[in-house]
Image (spheres, rainbow, N blue to C red):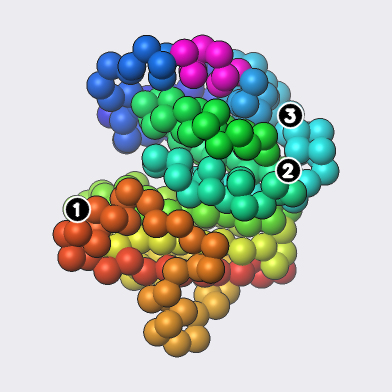
């Protein structure tokens, strides 16, 4: 599937993933109608911010450190991090509206108030994130695009990694989790090119999850199917 931004000044960008699946449940429709506007960080979409004015993250999160999760899936990890670190502000970015609705329900249930949601392409968010404004980023079980001709669609290409590096502070942490060996290979090649240092020194550094990790439904599926998770930690240089 290919989409583009609506505003005439917006750059044309391919988007290959789904943005909507099966019909939403009434409760999920209610979450979207009642909660999304409040939780969505304004100025991200081109139609409301054609000049690409940077987000005021200090105002958005009252001066808290800011983290970013790229493609939050079922939202388990995002909500877990928000509950574990109430003194941090976290933005979750996900274009698939069905899982956005799922996340909003989890946010209500958990009662966390330090989350914001961008229901769209992370590249639009990168446009308006101030330089060196993020303290941490997560890329957890991203779409593997297994066919070789589709590898350029993976997040771990310079198209995505360079703006991510620009938005991260020097010394900021970038975590990647995947169960796809070839995604590990591409990650270890491409992420350092964008200005990161891999912190792995021995097998336990990529075999053991982080101390504050919560296993997601995607990871549980991978384990049931006999695949091995890899946990890669990078540090932004500079």
In the depicted structure, whether residue 215 falls above or below residue 114: below
Q: Residue at x 49, y 19 (%)?
A: 31
Which circle's residue, 3 or 1, is located before the other in the chain? 3
- The answer to whether residue 202 is visible is yes
Q: Which of the numbered marks, if any, corresponds to residue 159? A: none
Q: Residue at x 52, y 32 (%)?
A: 109
**Residue nearest the observer in this picture, 37 or 29:** 29
Q: Main secondary structure of the magenta part?
A: helix
**Residue nearest the observer in this picture, 44 or 210:** 210
Question: Residue beneath label 3, please?
Answer: 53
Which quarter of the rendering shows the C terminus? bottom right
Mark 1 residue crowding within 10 angstroms, few (<14) / some (14–19) / many (20+):
few
Q: Is residue 167 left or right of residue 93?
A: right
Instruction: Identify the secondary structure beneath mark 2.
Output: loop
Quote the CA–CA distance across marks 2 and 1.
34 Å
In the depicted structure, whether residue 203 falls above or below residue 177: below
Quote the CA–CA distance across marks 2 and 3.
9 Å
Which quarter of the rendering shows the N terminus? top left
- Residue 53 is situated, as x and y percent measured from the top left of the image, at 74, 29
**Residue nearest the observer in this picture, 206 or 219:** 219
Q: Is residue 167 left or right of residue 227?
A: right
Location of residue 63 by image quarter: top right
Question: Residue beneath label 1, please?
Answer: 147
């Amino acid at each position: 599937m290919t989409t583009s931004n609506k505003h005439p000044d917006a750059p044309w960008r391919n988007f290959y993933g789904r943005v909507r699946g099966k019909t939403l449940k009434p409760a999920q429709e209610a979450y979207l109608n009642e909660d999304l506007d409040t939780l969505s960080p304004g100025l991200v979409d081109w139609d409301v911010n054609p000049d690409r004015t940077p987000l005021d993250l200090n105002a958005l999160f009252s001066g808290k450190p800011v983290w970013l999760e790229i493609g939050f899936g079922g939202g388990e990890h995002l909500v877990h991090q928000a509950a574990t670190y109430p003194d941090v502000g976290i933005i979750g970015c996900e274009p698939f509206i069905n899982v956005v609705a799922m996340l909003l329900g989890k946010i209500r249930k958990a009662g966390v108030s330090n989350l914001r949601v961008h229901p769209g392409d992370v590249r639009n968010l990168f446009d308006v994130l101030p330089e060196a404004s993020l303290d941490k980023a997560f890329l957890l079980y991203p779409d593997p695009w297994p066919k070789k001709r589709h590898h350029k669609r993976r997040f771990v290409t310079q198209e995505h990694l360079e703006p991510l590096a620009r938005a991260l502070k020097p010394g900021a942490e970038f975590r990647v989790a995947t169960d796809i060996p070839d995604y590990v290979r591409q990650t270890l090649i491409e992420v350092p090119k964008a200005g990161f240092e891999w912190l792995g020194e021995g097998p336990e550094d990529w075999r053991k999850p982080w101390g504050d990790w919560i296993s997601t439904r995607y990871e549980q599926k991978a384990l049931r199917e006999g695949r091995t998770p890899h946990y890669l930690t990078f540090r932004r240089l500079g």
